Amino acid sequence: AQKITQTQPGMFVQEKEAVTLDCTYDTSDPSYGLFWYKQPSSGEMIFLIYQGSYDQQNATEGRYSLNFQKARKSANLVISASQLGDSAMYFCAMREGSGTYKYIFGTGTRLKVLA
Amino acid sequence: DADVTQTPRNRITKTGKRIMLECSQTKGHDRMYWYRQDPGLGLRLIYYSFDVKDINKGEISDGYSVSRQAQAKFSLSLESAIPNQTALYFCATSDAGLNEKLFFGSGTQLSVL
């Protein structure tokens, strides 16, 4: 069965520093997609970045990059040059390419950026 | 206007009451989902639907039911609410491709007293 694990309940980072949020996954499907979402204190879910299992290069979107290590089944989110507005909850999610096409989520990491 | 609209935004109800959370979308997506979010547990899938005639249970469907009234509308019902159903509920939609992200509504904060 597919599973997403986020082992860091909370993280602190100094403003302007880079931070890595960990995500590991488990699936037997060779085709899958990995997503990261941000949830600020206002509660909405904001899509950040996507990585496909067959993508050869790590995904990047502005200050966000995804460190995809397929053999280790990890999909860590890297935020460069942290800003105060990055303080939020971050969720890793996966969608399998065959079968039910459900999206499953990890338990999240709460990031606090310090001034 | 939001692409995925949930109503109500907040609801307080009493144990044993029936309550319905509604979701409508203008994305034109066939796939719709209901999740609940609890602190420390992330988002868990309650039900999902791939078209009007296709409804599937998620990992935590007990105590909930759904209705897909049209492609654009997907409602979640709590037949007899209980306190441990207090949570933030999200409706989401997606298109069919593997790389298609979920589009979320603003959420409904439900409190069952």
Image (tube, rainbow, N blue to C red):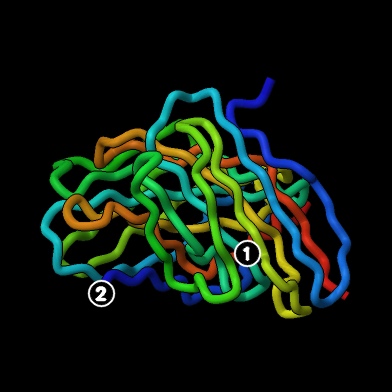
Residue A99, horizontal then vertical, whole percent? 19, 57
Q: In the rendering, which numbered label is found on residue B59? A: none
Q: Residue at x 56, y 67 (%)?
A: B42
Residue B106 in the figure: left or right of residue A8: right
* Dot 1 alpha-carbon crowd within 10 angstroms: few under 14, some 14 to 19, many 20 or more: some
- The quadrant in which the N terminus of chain A is found is bottom left
Q: Residue at x 31, y 40 (%)?
A: A59
Mark 2 vs mark 1, CA separation in Å: 21 Å
Residue A96 image-quadrant placement: bottom left
* Dot 2 alpha-carbon crowd within 10 angstroms: few under 14, some 14 to 19, many 20 or more: few
Residue position marked by numbered label 1 in the rendering: B37
Type of amino acid at the residue the image marks with label 1: Gln
- Secondary structure beneath label 1: strand
> Height in image: A72 above or below B52?
below
> Height in image: A69 above or below A78?
below
* In-front residue for pair B103/A35: B103
Residue position marked by numbered label 2 in the rendering: A1
> Height in image: A92 above or below B30?
below
